[in-house]
Image (cartoon, rainbow, N blue to C red):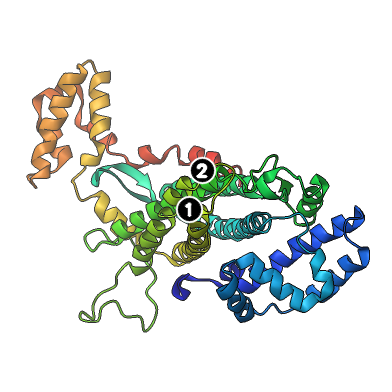
């Protein structure tokens, strides 16, 4: 994790202190259930909780022990025995390291999902507010980067709102799928531990028992979780890219907020660059980089190996921390985005009316011309406008074939901008409901 892109709530989930606290809770809850089954003395289970519940696990000490044992869970259990005393011999009865590691990892991922869901809610709120603010503000829609037909800026934000609504739903599904617990012992057979221990630990930690584990929780769950993060990161990049394009000097329909005292360039004092959305584009790439390794982790040798372990130690914190930062930053970008309706109007008029070409085409077909002939006539009048040789409406009026079918009054009526926004309310109701 890079501190520059780490927010406290998410970073804390992955801190060693948090991890060891979760490990302890898994072990202590398991001891409680084993005490109820008569496997562990009840007094020992109480002592384990009493000594470990508020303990400050010494990360440096655990690292010191691990430098000898070369095993992180054994190092933790050794340190726990230093805290608990003789009763620590009843910890980890019939369990294996993966029981602790996998259950902990899934707890961390569910907590991370909760933070990401909250981030998405914040972004959705910002998008909704600004979408309604600019609901009927006309701007040019582009295909292939080229002026196409009018839309509204509110629709552009509504597109993003709908996309991040799907992101939230996917996050909820990913959270539900990853929230499983495995306390099944070596190779997952429960040979040395009662299945009710797993059920009890799962309930205490807000998880579901893994239906069948092979000493490890199946990694298709994790692959889907990280794939979901990757898709959401792509949605962040899509919106960031739109803003970056709209901020280009030649376009300048929107602009990232530029604070008092902010500097855009070390060399050129005039620069106001889209640095936040460029940063978001880069962060999206980092999040997506976790997806392929997570897919590779699905295929382990037989009942388990640890080829997935080193991968997850990296992608777990990095992907969730980066996406958390990205969603929070994007919410801020949208909330403070500077919008320039006058520049949108200027760009709409830039091509001399060519944005209405489809209306002319359709009107000519309604007057009896074939589609092929209509297309040729409209294109014939349009191409000079591209070269700066006149206005589209004037050229249409002067074209004998077009004039035969459409009067000057009819042609002018076809240049009505409001025609293109007549269904904005319908689209908004689909996206936002009745609000």
Q: Position of residue 343 (x, y in %)?
A: 29, 59
Q: Is residue 412 above or below residue 137?
A: above
Q: Is 388 in front, or is 53?
A: 53
Q: Which mark is residue 85?
A: none
**SS class, disc 1:** helix
Sequence-first tag of 1 and 2: 1
Q: Is residue 157 at all visible to an observer of this figure?
A: no
Q: Say which residue appears at 53% left-offset and 57% top-offset.
A: 309
Image quarter for residue 60?
A: bottom right
Please give the count of numbered marks on the rendered protein.
2
Q: CA distance from mark 1 to mark 2?
A: 9 Å
Q: Position of residue 410 (x, y in %)?
A: 25, 30
Image quarter for residue 90?
A: bottom right
Q: Position of residue 269 (x, y in %)?
A: 23, 81
Q: Is 376 in front, or is 201?
A: 201
To which residue does mark 1 refer? 131
Q: Say which residue appears at 21% left-offset and 60% top-offset.
A: 250
Q: Is residue 44 at all visible to an observer of this figure?
A: yes
Q: Position of residue 48 (x, y in %)?
A: 83, 70
- Given contact means CB atoms under 8 Å apart, are the residues at marks 1 and 2 in contact? yes
**SS class, disc 2:** helix
Q: Is 291 in front, or is 342?
A: 291
Q: Mark 1, residues whose alpha carbon is within 10 Å: few (<14), some, or many (≥20)?
A: many
To which residue does mark 2 refer? 428
Q: Say which residue appears at 67% left-offset and 55% top-offset.
A: 103
User: Left of 101 or right of it: where is 412?
Assistant: left
């Amino acid at each position: 994790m890079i501190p520059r892109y780490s927010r406290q709530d998410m970073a804390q989930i992955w801190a060693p202190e948090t991890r060891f606290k979760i490990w302890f809770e898994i072990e202590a809850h398991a001891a409680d259930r084993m005490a109820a089954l008569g496997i562990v003395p009840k007094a020992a289970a109480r002592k384990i909780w009493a000594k470990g519940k508020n303990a400050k696990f010494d990360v440096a000490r655990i690292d010191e022990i691990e430098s000898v044992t070369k095993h992180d869970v054994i190092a933790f259990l050794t340190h726990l025995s230093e805290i608990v005393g003789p009763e620590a011999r009843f910890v980890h009865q019939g369990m294996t390291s993966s029981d602790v590691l996998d259950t902990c990892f899934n707890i961390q991922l569910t907590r991370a999902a909760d933070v990401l869901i909250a981030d998405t809610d914040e972004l959705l709120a910002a998008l909704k507010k600004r979408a309604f603010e600019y609901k009927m503000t006309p701007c040019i829609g582009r295909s292939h980067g080229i002026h196409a037909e009018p839309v509204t800026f509110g629709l552009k934000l509504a597109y993003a709102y709908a996309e991040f609504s799907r992101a939230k739903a996917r996050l909820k599904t990913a959270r539900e799928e990853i929230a499983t617990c495995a306390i099944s012992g070596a190779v997952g057979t429960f040979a040395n531990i009662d299945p009710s221990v797993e059920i009890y630990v799962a309930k205490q930690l807000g998880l579901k028992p893994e239906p069948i584990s092979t000493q490890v929780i199946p990694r298709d769950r994790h692959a889907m979780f990280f794939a979901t993060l990757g898709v959401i990161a792509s949605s962040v990049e899509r919106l960031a890219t739109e803003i970056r394009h709209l901020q280009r000097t030649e376009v300048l329909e929107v602009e990232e907020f530029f604070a008092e005292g902010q500097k855009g360039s070390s060399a050129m004092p005039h620069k106001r660059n889209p640095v936040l959305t460029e940063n978001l584009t880069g962060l999206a790439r980092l999040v997506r980089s976790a997806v392929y390794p997570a897919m590779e982790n699905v295929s382990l040798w037989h009942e388990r190996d640890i080829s997935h372990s080193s991968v997850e130690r990296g992608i777990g914190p990095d992907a969730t921390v980066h996406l958390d930062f990205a969603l929070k930053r994007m919410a801020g970008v949208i909330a403070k985005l500077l919008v320039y309706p006058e520049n949108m109007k200027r760009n709409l008029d830039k091509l001399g009316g060519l944005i209405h070409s489809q209306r002319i085409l359709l009107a000519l077909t309604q007057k009896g011309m074939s589609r092929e002939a209509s297309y040729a006539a409209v294109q014939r009048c349009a191409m000079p406008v591209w070269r700066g040789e006149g206005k589209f409406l004037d050229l249409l009026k002067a074209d004998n074939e077009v004039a035969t079918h459409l009067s000057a009054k009819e042609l002018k009526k076809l240049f009505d901008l409001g025609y293109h926004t007549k269904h904005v309310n319908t689209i908004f109701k689909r996206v936002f409901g009745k609000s």
